[in-house]
Amino acid sequence: MSTQEFAFTPYPDLPKSHYLNVAYGLKSWLFTTDHKRIGILYLLSITFFFALGGLYATAIRLELLTPAGDMVQPDTYNRLFTMHGILMVFFFLVPSIPAVLGNFLLPLMIGAKDVAFPRLNLASWYMYMFGAGFTMYALFMGGVDTGWTFYTPFSSTYSNSYVAAVAVGIFINGFSSIFTGINFMVTIHRMRAPGMTWSRLPLFVWSHYATSLIMVLGTPVLAITIVLLAMERVFKLGFFDPALGGDPVLFQHLFWFYSHPAVYIMILPSMGVISEIIAAFSRKPIFGYKFVAFASMGIAILGFLVWGHHLFVSSQSLYAGLIFSILSMLVAVPSAVKVFNWTATLYKGSIEYSTPMFYALGFIGLFTIGGLTGLMLATIGIDVHVHDTYFVVAHFHYIMVGGALMGYLGGLHYWWPKITGRMYPGFWSHLSALIIFLGFNLTFFPQFVLGYLGMPRRYHSYPEEFQILHILSTAGASILAVGYIIPLVYFIWSLKYGEVAGDNPWDAVGLEWQTTSPPSLHNFDEIPVVDFEPYDYVEHEPVERPYRYSRSEA
């Protein structure tokens, strides 16, 4: 089936009363306990931090255009990549899908009127903003130069930057994750609609349940680690600095015990989004639903057992390295199950190449590359060769950005009609998805080559023979930036000028599509009763939708 454009046709007005217009004024938003409005607050917040982190990335790529490192000083460059990492990891990637799409959609998907603890939900956003305030203070005062991993003893003793302020900000932000995780788990356990059994939960909900488990169990470890770092820095207590009797490798164990599972906080929600999109636009039930659901739980559990593969060159014993290498191979199995099942779902499906489907297919491609290179890094011999090179940078960007961000954008495009009641322009959304996919690969694939050839990460100057690869990477970053700006423009445009979407513009199944677009304040007029199986699609060619739009040739 060829890519299709859509010509809009009129549709009746939006619902007269919905969550966006039930109350007006800034106060009604800042004190709201409606999960949908809180999701919008998160959307605005993380979009700001994504843009700010992107500006740091732009400065990094401009610096690397030339080998001499002649745009900024080495210390400034250290601060650029550190603040880029902190903003993107802690204030965008970790909260993006759970805080925005999870908050908005999870109660709708299980037939609930809100989350279990609405006030705690609002408190999670305030904790996020409070933590971000400390981080922004550090940014305006000059930033941090330690790298986003805060490796000791440099971060705890020798750095002259504002490490303590950022540490406090990340510590406070951790409570936001914990509050969200607790809220989601209790909501899923206690507030499902009649008939919504565990075997009927959407895979989006399963992925958020697994993510919540990691948030609740893993985030306190990071919080305590950051507190110990701040105490060593401020009070000179010897936890990690050898000069004070501490052990810097202990910090790495504690940090990565959380930070590797944090990768799954970023990627598991995206996997849930992809499952929803692939089922909807291939008009088929997800192949092996239970395997995909249990794979989410398997990733969450096994993710806590693989942190040691970050320490292959950090004085860890060979025997421990072998165990962590085997476990790292094992955690790839449930991820491979998901990719196989998505592919099997697509097989002989009536595939419709909508914009969300573009992002889903892009996710599968980028995540597969990131996963396969992760297996390479889990192999001790290869890891020793490419450790702390651009190979590692390329790998985690394929997972955390190419995977997590493609899933996030795919989810926004899929549920934007439900969130706003409006559609976005088909041509521009198709174009932006293609630009992002091409720009991303041009940005980060050359970095695999750079790393294999021995280019260290975090260097602002480099040998001249590496320049052509850095030029390609910077050119790709420019294209990628255009791809990210286009959706921002047409999403804002659609709020006023977009065609009215209707309650279910995709002919999708699921409770969220059985309420109005945008949803009413309490989601459902009556508590729904679930008497159907998940992804109960009738396999057929995509139907004509005269009430929404008519098709024309691409």
Image: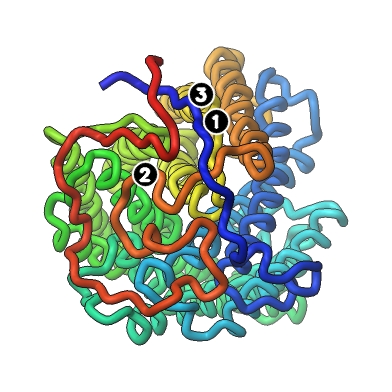
Provide residue 509's location: percent of width, then percent of height: 29, 55
Provide residue 457's location: percent of width, then percent of height: 55, 37
Q: Which residue is mark 2?
A: 506
Amino acid of disc 1 = Pro
Q: CA distance from mark 2 to mark 3?
A: 17 Å
Q: Nearer the viewer, residue 264 or 326?
A: 264
Q: Which mark is residue 425?
A: 1
Instruction: Judge depth for marks 2 and 3 and give the one in front.
Output: 2
- Vertical order, 10 against 422 (above or below): above
Give me the residue at 43% from left, 34% from top.
355
Residues marked 1 and 3 touching at CB (< 8 Å): yes
Image quadrant assignment for residue 151: bottom right
Provide residue 55's location: percent of width, then percent of height: 72, 38
Q: CA distance from mark 1 to mark 2?
A: 15 Å
Q: Earlier in the sequence, mark 2 or mark 3?
A: 3
State the colouring used for the structure image: rainbow
For label 3, the crowd category at 10 Å Cα-Cα, with few meaning under 14, some 14 to 19 and many 20 or more, is: some
Which structural element holds mark 2? loop
For label 1, the crowd category at 10 Å Cα-Cα, with few meaning under 14, some 14 to 19 and many 20 or more, is: many
Residue 548 is at least partly visible in this image: yes
Amino acid of disc 2 = Trp
Image quadrant assignment for residue 367: top left
For label 2, the crowd category at 10 Å Cα-Cα, with few meaning under 14, some 14 to 19 and many 20 or more, is: many
Q: Which residue is mark 3?
A: 427
Q: CA distance from mark 1 to mark 3?
A: 6 Å
Residue 244 is at least partly visible in this image: no
Q: Is residue 206 left or right of residue 118?
A: left
Provide residue 443's location: percent of width, then percent of height: 52, 26
Q: Earlier in the sequence, mark 1 or mark 2?
A: 1
Q: Nearer the viewer, residue 19 or 442?
A: 19
Give me the residue at 56% from left, 13% from top.
468
- Vertical order, 15 against 66 (above or below): below
